[in-house]
Image: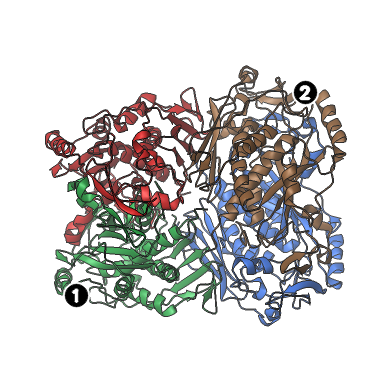
Chain colours: A blue, B brown, C green, D red
Amino acid sequence: MSSQIGKNIKVTVFGESHGPAIGMVMDNPPAGLRLDFDYISAQNKRRAPGNDKTATPRKEADEPEFLSGVKNGVTTGAPIAVCIRNTNTKSGDYEALLNTPRPSHADYAAFVQSKGHNDVAGGGHFSGRLTAPIVTAGSILRLYLKEKDIEIGGHILKIGTAEDERFDPINIDADSLFSLSKSNFALLNPKAEEKMRAEVESARLEGDSIGGIVEIAVKGLPAGLGGPMFEGVENEIAKAVFGIPAVKGIEFGAGFEFAEMRGSQANDQMYYDGGKVLCTTNNNGGITGGLTNSMPIVFRVAIKPTPSIAKPQQTVDLKTGNNTELIIHGRHDPCIVPRALPAIEAATAIAIANLINEVNS
Amino acid sequence: MSSQIGKNIKVTVFGESHGPAIGMVMDNPPAGLRLDFDYISAQNKRRAPGNDKTATPRKEADEPEFLSGVKNGVTTGAPIAVCIRNTNTKSGDYEALLNTPRPSHADYAAFVQSKGHNDVAGGGHFSGRLTAPIVTAGSILRLYLKEKDIEIGGHILKIGTAEDERFDPINIDADSLFSLSKSNFALLNPKAEEKMRAEVESARLEGDSIGGIVEIAVKGLPAGLGGPMFEGVENEIAKAVFGIPAVKGIEFGAGFEFAEMRGSQANDQMYYDGGKVLCTTNNNGGITGGLTNSMPIVFRVAIKPTPSIAKPQQTVDLKTGNNTELIIHGRHDPCIVPRALPAIEAATAIAIANLINEVNS
Amino acid sequence: MSSQIGKNIKVTVFGESHGPAIGMVMDNPPAGLRLDFDYISAQNKRRAPGNDKTATPRKEADEPEFLSGVKNGVTTGAPIAVCIRNTNTKSGDYEALLNTPRPSHADYAAFVQSKGHNDVAGGGHFSGRLTAPIVTAGSILRLYLKEKDIEIGGHILKIGTAEDERFDPINIDADSLFSLSKSNFALLNPKAEEKMRAEVESARLEGDSIGGIVEIAVKGLPAGLGGPMFEGVENEIAKAVFGIPAVKGIEFGAGFEFAEMRGSQANDQMYYDGGKVLCTTNNNGGITGGLTNSMPIVFRVAIKPTPSIAKPQQTVDLKTGNNTELIIHGRHDPCIVPRALPAIEAATAIAIANLINEVNS
Amino acid sequence: MSSQIGKNIKVTVFGESHGPAIGMVMDNPPAGLRLDFDYISAQNKRRAPGNDKTATPRKEADEPEFLSGVKNGVTTGAPIAVCIRNTNTKSGDYEALLNTPRPSHADYAAFVQSKGHNDVAGGGHFSGRLTAPIVTAGSILRLYLKEKDIEIGGHILKIGTAEDERFDPINIDADSLFSLSKSNFALLNPKAEEKMRAEVESARLEGDSIGGIVEIAVKGLPAGLGGPMFEGVENEIAKAVFGIPAVKGIEFGAGFEFAEMRGSQANDQMYYDGGKVLCTTNNNGGITGGLTNSMPIVFRVAIKPTPSIAKPQQTVDLKTGNNTELIIHGRHDPCIVPRALPAIEAATAIAIANLINEVNS
């Protein structure tokens, strides 16, 4: 069971939802980077539960402790270890789930993989809580990217049938992305909020949950990053983003809409603008042939509804070998989308920082 | 510029469209596998141009020569090197493109990445022709998977607005997948063919191209493969599949449709069936928490229209620094979807074979 | 600055000598392994200072705290994170060294690599103290290997001119190796101890230090592990063992003595012994062609004298750009060899556990 | 069975001694490097048999064909594939060896690893002939290093009891290393040649073989390359060099002689020389704490006598399960040391090129 990402800057995530602590180690981090701990803390808050009505009221302190790799607030280049203690853990809620895997959760598959040795409480290592160290790692690398004028930002594009506007993929500026990345309910058009919240509230009242889509943009990357095949920009971002629980799809630029497009519509026409090569459209979402092409990167990510719902569900009892009904107690998010957004941005940051760090001798 | 994939079975793809040869090396391949050269050859033919009206009439022999790793038709366990000589190369067609990058191709980005040292003719290492060694590598590994009763298959789901049926994700059998994987125009419902071909022909007559979607299924995987985060099944398949040129999106199970779903609809209810744990639905596409869950894997892949079209396009002249118009001559595919399908299946096979080979001690 | 090892079971070491904590994360560890914490603690004690007269009297608690990956004393398969708090840190001793790199230490090179951002106190991340998490990781994996009847052990072969006997490379049994691995001053022939200690004491009294050689054996490996070239058994052990500070050489079997040998002497003649293929000699140290050959693995490791000595030394002042004299204060080991031994055994265990876990499909 | 090396520039070696071809693929090579094919060819000749009396009279053309990654003699950055056809193959000589593994060869271990599927003829993938693609890859990277004023060179230090002088480790210049690297029998002191050749000739006449030691130096590396633990300079060089068949030991700087040294003798005293930090001695062989320290790298490598000798040997018959006597026919090197030298230099070049390419952001 590997929980590592990155070819150059390698991030390993550890911990279980109800164990002593969660955290991460970043191997081969940038040296000489001044850490803005307020920024890191703010990103962790965006992800933490209890800060928005769409989320579970469960409160987590989530204060990352830096164990190594930082001296006087500046990274030394040695591995950075961060530890977040688990405090508010109600293992009791999960006792009942020991032998009755929750539908659409990892429970059953994890049981098979570890031959029954997995930590079941709260999903153990598979818990969404493990995105906290990912956000911490991503925040560090966003500060690193910021020094190179690279900004990552995103917004909630859809919850249920309620939709925000899409990014205008040829007019994205770093400042707006930075503003988005400070919000707990990031939207391009604030008018979308009311309808989205109504979708969530309706699901919550029914003991149910609802899915959504987020849209991410990356601004400031030079052309020529990535690779022709399996280490292209799309590959690396996809590999990172599917690391966030509940992500079930990703599309770059026009994505699935390409299916109905003609080449003459789809191709992004090129021109010089003050010595810089740009495109009149950005259907490719900033990536052609696996490489950045100087346009902003734009992609969308599908997020399934939280599997933990209050309604009764059908499952199996692994002990008795019988079918059984399951009622999940405890506090759960009716909609994980707003909290997944900063985690997806963080995963993107890890992928991008590794691409930047790629050597083309 | 890395063109390698795989953590255990590592495939490195080499070659340029108009260089002496293309090929691949498979490091750490399975030992003792009898190679069915007819099968490998048949898969290469599915990918090769000139075999279907939707494709360019250009003919390529594409006969893979095995240089190593095979003795008397059986793999020895040593690296398998395969070389495919380039014969039908009309470099002349590409002379004109040297300084005028083709819109939506890798040309410009590759020029920047290699500081002008890239091989431009036919896209060089970025050419779609490089999928031939990927198909060869994938075919070898499909034979390996077949020995373990794992079958991969796919079909064309959409071209333009013409659509095939979707897989019934809870009723997929290995034999049907194997049948699909022998077809040059694989469909679940043959009735879809006429409308699809009409879409392609219409684009072709206008000197244009058209995109599409393919759907892939994997049958026979045990539960518990994959990992909780960045080495999950979705991550690894996505990383592999985005290695095929023109792929711009991937979604697993219900994918982007999850956005409008409630948890109560989306969650796959579990039950025992003769001692086996199954689900009544398969919205998760066979993967929960990054792990296989005993249901078939199902995913869809978006493919953009071939960027090479006959219509005039706007681009830049990298030598003069001026904007210019580009006319691409030569023979091109009006629709790459049928030829991309076997390449996507092959990339999937490489990902799956590596997952199977993962050690969970 | 990467501090990671392992292709399958990946161990990342973190921390600085005088930072908040040191530790390690083991990604993709074996699942279902019952941890013998007494064994792990005993191995850590062998490495810790203050337990033998040859070492610095500095005391360190070195109690590893398991943060994740273990439930009721059994590994779950999720990453294992271990944290060891730094308590007895006298940073003051090192203030003076900030700009005057210690000869034969990493100080100067680390300063250049991190552009001055490295943590200087006590060597920071380059400190020998960082072998504590390596020993912890190695101990976990030695328990894992023990379950497969694989035992690693070693002894002090040489300190100064004082020598122990060598292993009889064709008669090594697992029990003796296990006994050796419990000793703080492991020897095959106890008579060697007096002379060795005299060498150390003589160096200590002169404010100097002394080097040595250790010899390691691995018993119980099946034939056929490893690889033909760069992932052979020698490569992997060497890569691991050079990770222990002060290691400057490694030789397998007859090692450098091969130079004067004829093939007819050197070749290990083969014979059947009760259905098992064995050799009459073991000049190859259990490895031929990069692969285990069913004989015990035997190798020797050269260890340089501790660079930190009380005598005045010549160095440079990085601030003023002048040459200067350096006096290192504080408590230091006159001979690191006995404490390096368990660390080298641990590094060997990490290498071997990864080889065992290698898939040959 | 993996035959790959390199974290950034990845070289995969393929082929069997008596198969269609051997070769290598270099993934992620430097772009824009002009290849000096004469240099590459000269290095291959140094390694090839038949060019010196110490070697087998067997002749091999060994002409590397570049299949990809090179355009007009300049690397494009795409993977470089090189293929060397096997021509002079006398498989007949090896028929007899099919079931009787040669002592001290990989034969038996390879048989076990591949469950009998290995290619036995001439050692198959384990043959020393596979160093030809390693030398080719290394030569390309030596040209790359040369552009950065980094030179690698070596000499025969010892054959039997005959010895050359050692490098003066503080006075090594790049030009002398380059001269050494053009010789088929590289020595610092030409007087050593006669006695060395006498050792070889004596072994040859008796149907026997003889071992030796080579010494390698690397000049021109900046300080601060490498890493603190498992990716240090010693680790990476050792991992590469043990990839050359018959290598059984490696020591850096004073190596095993450190055992008898005091810290006060061993420590390399530092001083400023025209703004550069240097050392008065170089006992550390240019590496402290796993990092280059601005002094030349110096290391020695132990090479065992060629296992293939004409004298009768004891082995087993894997088919009958009986002990048996083995007579190896065919032409063999009485001393592999002169031919191993360029291969070890090449492996060193691969390791160094990867270190240079390491990103320290």
On what subunit does the disc labeled 1 rest?
C
On what subunit does the disc labeled 2 rest?
B
Circle nearer the viewer, 2 or 1: 1
Q: In the image, is residue B57 above or below residue C41?
A: above
* Whole-percent x, y for residue A83 in the image: 54, 69
Q: To which quarter of the image does residue C90 belong? A: bottom left
Q: Which mark is residue C190?
A: 1
Q: Are marks 2 and 1 in contact (CB under 8 Å)?
A: no
Quote the CA–CA distance across marks 2 and 1: 87 Å
Bin the neighbour count of mark 2 within 10 Å (Cα to Cα): few under 14, some 14-19, many 20 and up: some
* Whole-percent x, y for residue B16 in the image: 57, 29
Report the side of C287 relative to A189 (left or right).
left
Amino acid residing under circle 2: Lys
* Towards the viewer: C83 or C327: C83
Q: Which mark is residue B311?
A: 2
Amino acid residing under circle 1: Pro
> Quick check: can you spot residue C102?
no
Q: Residue furthest top?
A: B92
At mark 2, the secondary structure is loop
> Quick check: can you spot residue B298?
yes
Respond whether the residues carrying marks 2 and 1 are from the same subunit: no
Q: To which quarter of the image does residue A78 belong? A: bottom left
* Whole-percent x, y for residue B167 in the image: 80, 50
